[in-house]
Structure formats: C-alpha cells, structure tokens
Image: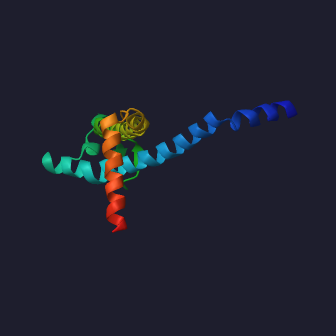
Amino acid sequence: MSKFLTEFKEFAMRGNVIDMAVGVVIGGAFGKIVSSLVDDLIMPLVGVATGGMNFTDYKWVIQKGVNDAAGAVITPEVSLNWGSWVQTIVNFIIVAFCIFVMIKAINQLKREKAAEPEALASAPEPTKEEQLLTEIRDLLKKEADAK
C-alpha cells in the first residue's frame, strides 16, 4: 500500500497535473463569468431584439402533465426543452469566442516578447562614419561642458 501512495504522490505532484488542476479551476470560474455575460447581458438584448422572446421558455410538449383538484402533480409533464438547448448553444459560441480572443491576445504578447531580443540582436553594426560622427559629437559636448 505504501508503494501505491508513493506513486500517487509522485503523479499528483508532477508539474503537469498541478498546471491542469489550476487550468480546470480557472476555466470553471471563467465559464461562470461568461455564463453570466450570456444570461444577464446578451440574452436579454436578444429577447428585446426578438420581441420579448425568452428561449428557455420554448419547449415541445410530448405528454401534458396531470394535476388533481387541489393542484398537486399526479403525472409530470414530459417535454423537449429545445429553448434551453438553443440557450446552451449560444453560451457555447460565446464561451468559445471569448477563449479564442483570450488565446489570441496571449499569443500576441508571446510573439511581441519573443521579437524583442531579435530586434535588439538584429540592430546593424554602426558604420565607420557613424562611429566617427559619434566621437565628434562627444568631443563637441565635452568642449561645451568645459566652457
């Protein structure tokens, strides 16, 4: 049993597993943010644009529910909630778009960071004329400072 625990500890403490766990937690939080964006901001605007339509209310009733005289449910309604499915598809598209934009921004930052050393390394060597002009400038500055 001790070998099993040792192997599990080695597996769990590997960098990739911890990175993946952090990614899952951050992804879950990011998903909640985007779901709130969809539910609280985008879908109400879609509802207004479509005349007050709320997709989650749309369903196809296969079998109507049966209630007794007091209003208690005897047999629940059986329905296909296609409006919720549309809502989920919209959520997915927006989450995918947000992740695309975020990854694109991260890749752009990586490219810019990788290009900085190349820009410094690719600066051309000054010509002899440029070196001579630099020396003359420095000498003239020394003379002006001495006066």
**Residue for point 40% across, 52% down:** 72
Name the residue located 19 percent from the left edge and 46 percent from the top edge: 46
Closest to the observer, 91 or 117: 117
Q: Quadrant of the C terminus?
A: bottom left
Above or below for 124 versus 76: above
**Nearest to the observer: residue 30 or residue 60:** 30
Q: Is residue 25 above or below residue 4?
A: below
17 sits left or right of 4 in the view: left
Q: Residue furthest right?
A: 2
Q: Nearer the viewer, residue 139 or 63?
A: 139
Q: Residue at x 58, y 39 (%)?
A: 19
Q: From the image, which quarter does the N terminus lie in?
A: top right
Q: How is the image coloured?
A: rainbow
Q: In the rendering, at what x and y percent does residue 15 appear?
A: 64, 36
Residue 140 sits in quarter: bottom left
> Is residue 98 in view from this perspective?
no
Specify the quadrant of the image occupied by residue 11: top right
Taking depth in this image into account, of 87 and 37 the one nearest to the observer is 37
Say left or right for 99 vs 19: left
Q: How many marks?
A: 0
Whole-percent x, y for residue 67 in the image: 36, 47
Rendered location of residue 52, percent (x, y): 16, 50
